[in-house]
Image (cartoon, rainbow, N blue to C red):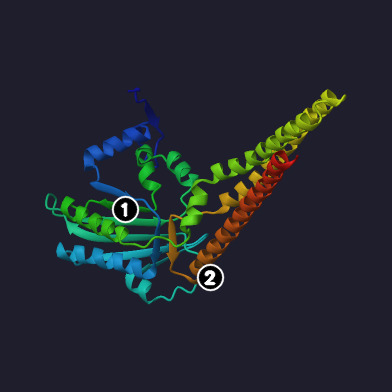
Amino acid sequence: MAEQTLIPKDSDSNGSKGLSVDIDHDRLRYFFYMMNGEPARRIESFCGAIAVSKADVEVLIDSLIDKLKLSQIRDFTIKIGVGFDKIVVEKSFDDFKAYQWNEPYSTKEVVIKINCMIEDYETGNPLNNSMFIRIEKNIHSGNVLQIITSSDSSKIDDIDSLMCPVFCRTEYLHDELSKSLMGAVSDWHAGLKQPPILSKSHEFIKKNKRRVARTIHYLYPLVATFICIAALFITSKYLSSHSSYLAIVAAIVVSANYLIMFFTAYGARRARGMFEHMAKISSQDVIFDITRGDDKESSERINENEKSFSYAKATFAWSVIQNLVASLIASALLIWLP
């Protein structure tokens, strides 16, 4: 451990002098926990796509209140924050239930904070016990950057937990109550509906978009190669005795090379366009149904997915039909020409 340097302290208004010590953040935190004890904390996270409505939030809080009352805790406060793009509206539980939530904005996160004062048996002083629940959608790399740049290095170990849509943390609650509250959140999460954003066909396309695009990419040059081979067979069958046979074969080979190059590039363009539309088919880990803006956002997302899927499906079908017809014509000429 590096030596700590004593630095002379400037004289204060009374003319007295002293010494100060320069201690880094981690060392200062160690001294604080050594003197006051490290906070008792439990963290759990729940992954998986969910649809959360206002009624679902009320059900969750009612179940948590029941758990608190079973533990003889009557004095507690509950705050619910509904976050939008730029603002957060925070209300008590009663106000949250009574409020109509007619905002035109879409909900980005819901934060539930529960605080209760419980007497510490060792010191006899009341101790603030709390539970924090965050339900957030579209968690992105900015969340990770915020954690990494935080002065609290211990948060880096919690990246996996923080990236889940539902994140819970209890502080100072005794073990039995903490487990009971976490169990209530787990049961609530397990009973939520799945977001109706992607159908099975949409999910298949989204999962296999690279394979589908690669198929279209190489289908065109593959059929072009087959047509060129068929042309060589027909030429050798009917023009093998011709005086310019070798020149004709050479012309077919050169033309085939350019033809395959052209259809390789053409297939790549068709595949790229189809892949871009398939990439737009997206699901969301959390679908909120709290404000009027949430209904609009979900409908728009479903419509955009349907448009992207229709374009990809039409492109794939038309490409397959084109190449199938070309292959059948080449096969017919190869087989049925006298």
Name the quadrant of the C terminus: top right
Horizontal and vertical percent position of residue 226: 68, 36
On the rendered structure, is 313 left or right of 34?
Answer: right
Q: CA distance from mark 2 to mark 1?
A: 28 Å
**Residue at figure coordinates x 32%, y 23% from the top left:** 1
State whether residue 47 is above or below residue 243: below
State whether residue 255 is above or below residue 125: above
Q: Amino acid at mark 1?
A: Cys
**Residue at figure coordinates x 52%, y 50% from the top left:** 205
> Which residue is tagged 2?
104
Which residue is farthest left? 121
> Which residue is tagged 1?
168
Q: Quadrant of residue 111?
A: bottom left
Q: Secondary structure at mark 2?
A: loop
On the rendered structure, is 197 left or right of 126?
Answer: right
* Residue nearest the observer in this picture, 323 or 275: 323
User: Mark 1 Cα within 10 Å, few/some/many (few <14, many 20+)?
Assistant: many
Q: Earlier in the sequence, mark 2 or mark 1?
A: 2
* Residue nearest the observer in this picture, 16 or 171: 171
